[in-house]
Amino acid sequence: MLTDKIDELLKEVSALSAKNAEDVEQLRLKYLSKKGEINAIIADFRNVAKEEKRELGIKINELKKAATDKINALREQVETTETASESLDLTRTAYPVDLGTRHPLTLVRNEIIDIFQRMGFTLYNGPEVDDDKHVFTMLNFAADHPARDMQDTFFISQNPNDVTKNVLLRSHTSGDEAHYMETHEPPIRVLCPGRVYRNEAISARAHCFFHQVEGLYVDKGVSFTDLKQVLLTFAREMFGADTKIRLRPSFFPFTEPSAEMDISCSICGGKGCNFCKHTGWVEILGCGMVDPHDLAACNIDPEVYTGYAFGMGVERIANLKYGVNDLRLFSENDTRFLEEFQSAY
Ligand code: DAH
C-alpha cells in the first residue's frame, strides 16, 4: 500500500546522515530528483482511488517537506564542518603574535631613569594639564617676565587679567618640582619624567610636544659640586666613559646660579661635525641651584635646606644616542623607523 510506503520513507528520511557533500548529493538524487523515490510515489498517486486522494496528498507533501528539510540540514552541517577543518592550518607558525618594539623615546627615558635610580633617585609623575601656579609662579616666573615667552604653550583656560590663574598644558617638567616639594619634606631626591607641550611650529628641530626628565635634590648642605658630579656621572653612563662635560652660565628663573650643560659631541668625539655645528660640544640640559624663592613657596626653609635641579630633553638625548636628526620621526609611527630599535633593549 502507498501509505505504508510513505510511512516507511518518512522514517528512513528522518534517520538520514551524511559525512560530506558527496553523500548529501547522493541522498538528494535518491529522494528528491526526477527519478527519485518521492517522484515515484507521486507517479503511483495517479492510480489511487478518488476518496483516498486527499489524505494521501497531504502525506506526500509532508514527506516531500521532511526530505527537503533533512537534506538541506545535512548540507549545511557538512559545509560548516568542512570549512572548519579547512581553516585549521597546521603549518602556521606557533608564534602568530608579532611582538612590537619599545619606542626609542621609552628606551632612552628608561635608561635615564635607570642611571639616576642607581644614584638613589625615586620617581614622581606630575600632571600634564597643570596650573600656572605650579608651572610658573611657584618657580619664580614673574607674571610679566619674558622667560614665559620662551615657553608659550596651549591653554585650557586663560584669565585675561591675571595670568597666574591660567590652566595650561605644562611647558616643562619643572612644575613637578613645585608639586613634589609642596607635598614632601626634605631630604628629596626625585626624578620626574613626562611629556611637555609648547606652541611651536613643527619642524625637524621643534615639535609642539616632546619629553623631558626633571631631577631635584633638596637636603641640608647640597652644593653645586654635588650637582656637577651627579651630571658628570650621568653623562659618562649615558654616552660612554670618555665623555666630557662643560657648564656654561645661563638663566632660569627657578635656579640661581643656573647653567646649561654641554657634553663632548658623541657623534664626532669632540672633533667637530655638522651635528655639533663644528664646536665639538652639544647642549643636553639646563640645571642650577634651586632658588630660595621656590623652597619658600613650598614651605621648605631656605635657611636650612639647599638643593639642585636639572632638566633634560629626552628627544635630544635620543638624537645624540641614535643619530636621529628629525624630531618628527618620533611621533609619525612609521614602523620602518620604530623597528630599527628592535635590538636596542
Ligand atoms: N625647565 C627648563 C626648560 O624646559 C629646563 C631646566 C633648566 C630644568 C634648569 C631645570 C633647571 O630643573 O634647573 O627649558
Image (cartoon, rainbow, N blue to C red):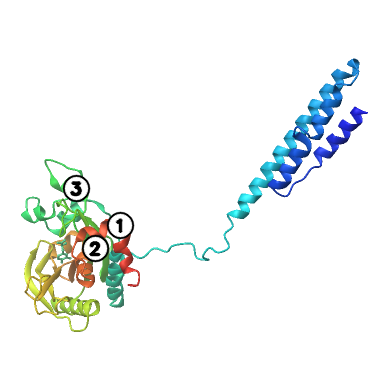
Q: Is residue 207 left or right of residue 340?
A: left
Would you identify the image quadrant in which residue 265 lies?
Answer: bottom left
Front residue of 132/202: it is 202
Q: Residue at x 21, y 48 (%)?
A: 168
**Res 27 visible:** yes
Give neighbour class at mark 3: few <14, some 14-19, many 20+ (Cα, 10 Å).
some
In front: mark 1 or mark 2? 1
Label 2 is placed on what type of residue? Met
Label 1 is placed on what type of residue? Asn
In front: mark 3 or mark 1? 1
The image shows residue 105, relative to residue 14, as above or below, that is below
Give neighbour class at mark 1: few <14, some 14-19, many 20+ (Cα, 10 Å).
few
- Whole-Å distance between the Cαs marked 2 and 3? 25 Å
Would you identify the image quadrant in which residue 140 lies?
Answer: bottom left
Front residue of 215/333: it is 333
According to the picture, the residue beneath numbered tag 2 turns out to be: 181
The quadrant of the rendering that contains the N terminus is top right
Would you identify the image quadrant in which residue 159 lies?
Answer: top left
**Which label was assigned to residue 333?**
1
Front residue of 125/218: it is 125
According to the picture, the residue beneath numbered tag 3 turns out to be: 154
Q: Position of residue 77 (x, y in %)?
A: 68, 45
Q: Position of residue 226 (x, y in %)?
A: 18, 78
- Whole-Å distance between the Cαs marked 3 and 1? 23 Å
Q: Of marks 3 and 1, which one's residue comes earlier in the chain? A: 3
Ligand 1 is located in which of the four quadrants?
bottom left
The image shows residue 215, relative to residue 83, as above or below, that is below
Q: Position of residue 297 (x, y in %)?
A: 17, 59
In front: mark 2 or mark 3? 3
| Residue with the most extreme top position | 51
Q: Residue at x 80, y 28 (%)?
A: 62
